[in-house]
Image (tube, rainbow, N blue to C red):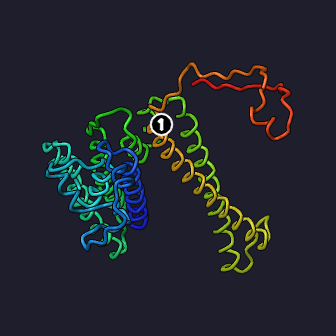
Amino acid sequence: MKLRALVFSALLAGCLMASQGISYAQFSGNGLFRDKAFGQSYNNDQTDQKDSVEVLFSFKEYFQGLSHKKEIPIGEVAGGSILFVGGMQIYNKDYWKLPLVYGGIGTGVGLGLHFNKKYNTSVAAGTPDDKAKLYRTLAFAGAGLFYWGSFLDGVISYQPSKWPHAGKATLYSILVPGLGQIYNHEIWKLPLYWGGLATAYHFFSENKMNYERFRIMYIKYCDEPGYSTVYTKDQVLYYRNIFRRYRDYSVLAMAAVYLIQIIDANVFSYMHNFEVDDNISVEVQPTVINPDQLLPAAGLGMTPGVGLSVGVKF
């Protein structure tokens, strides 16, 4: 359980930092990216010149944003809030929500530690307390739910100057798959992504169940002399390996669908205002091509040519 929590935290951190970089580079309303791209002085060797590698996260800028001294991208706010819980509520000036966030997380962690100690004591005594184990799981899950909810609340409360905002759409899809598409008013895509995730999870569940089945059978073949089934030992080993591979492929499929819907939300929110004139047209017609007036001086003829002209109106 602790390993899963660490993996989830690492994935969440990576996605949030990536969305911060995307929103910072593409969607900053003050033209910072344009100014840095076209306004640099390449012949200035002053010692205080910044490194050419852009820093995706700056604690200085983050705390300046929390103190409302400057406006920072929503991705940077979310990235800093991974460690500094409640940062999004502070940035949005929703101070009254902080006791709820801290209280919910603190209560869940405290109860989880209490029941974890109680369960470990019962295991040491030889009488495992299943209720304590269940309550421990529920308590830690509740703390995680409050932690996740603080991000979702921060994104919902964030009010950008334009719609759709790519950073907001990206964070929506990171937190809830498909929510970025709803925010972009592209609800028709939900069956594609939700269906893809559900299908991948179905195959993951089936392959995991079969893998565990053949894994246990193989262990019995190795540890219990005389054990036999309708499958030989070599067949059991083959099926164990094949279902393990299929299980891993299913995990990769879920990750791929999850990442694609994040990219989709980001790209289509960014290109939402990219307009093509409805009057775009292509006109093809025959034409007479007159020769260059300098051709006679070169000793060439003046015979006109016939061809096609293509005109594009947009």
Q: Image quadrant of residue 302?
A: top right
Q: Residue at x 40, y 63 (%)?
A: 10
Q: Is residue 20 above or below residue 264?
A: below
Q: Which residue is at the front of the view, 288 or 194? A: 288
Left or right: where 164 falls relative to 216: left
Q: Which residue is at the front of the view, 81 or 143? A: 81
Q: Which residue corresponds to mark 1?
A: 271
Residue 276 image point, x, y percent: 53, 27
Residue 172 image point, x, y percent: 39, 42
Q: Residue at x 34, y 54 (%)?
A: 39
- Identify the amino acid type marked 1: Met
User: How many dots with numbers?
Assistant: 1
Residue 289 image point, x, y percent: 78, 26
Q: Image quadrant of residue 155?
A: top left
Q: Is residue 241 above or below residue 206?
A: below
- Is disc 1 placed on a helix, strand or loop? loop
Left or right: where 77 falls relative to 95: right
> Furthest residue to the front?
297
Q: Residue at x 68, y 69 (%)?
A: 217
Q: Residue at x 47, y 36 (%)?
A: 271
Classify the position of the C terminus by image quarter.
Answer: top right
Q: Is residue 127 above or below residue 184?
A: below
Classify the position of the N terminus by image quarter.
Answer: bottom left
Q: Which residue is at the front of the view, 58 or 105? A: 58
Density class for disc 1 (Cα within 10 Å; few <14, some 14-19, many ≥20) is few
Q: Which residue is at the front of the view, 99 or 155? A: 155
Left or right: where 267 falls relative to 100: right
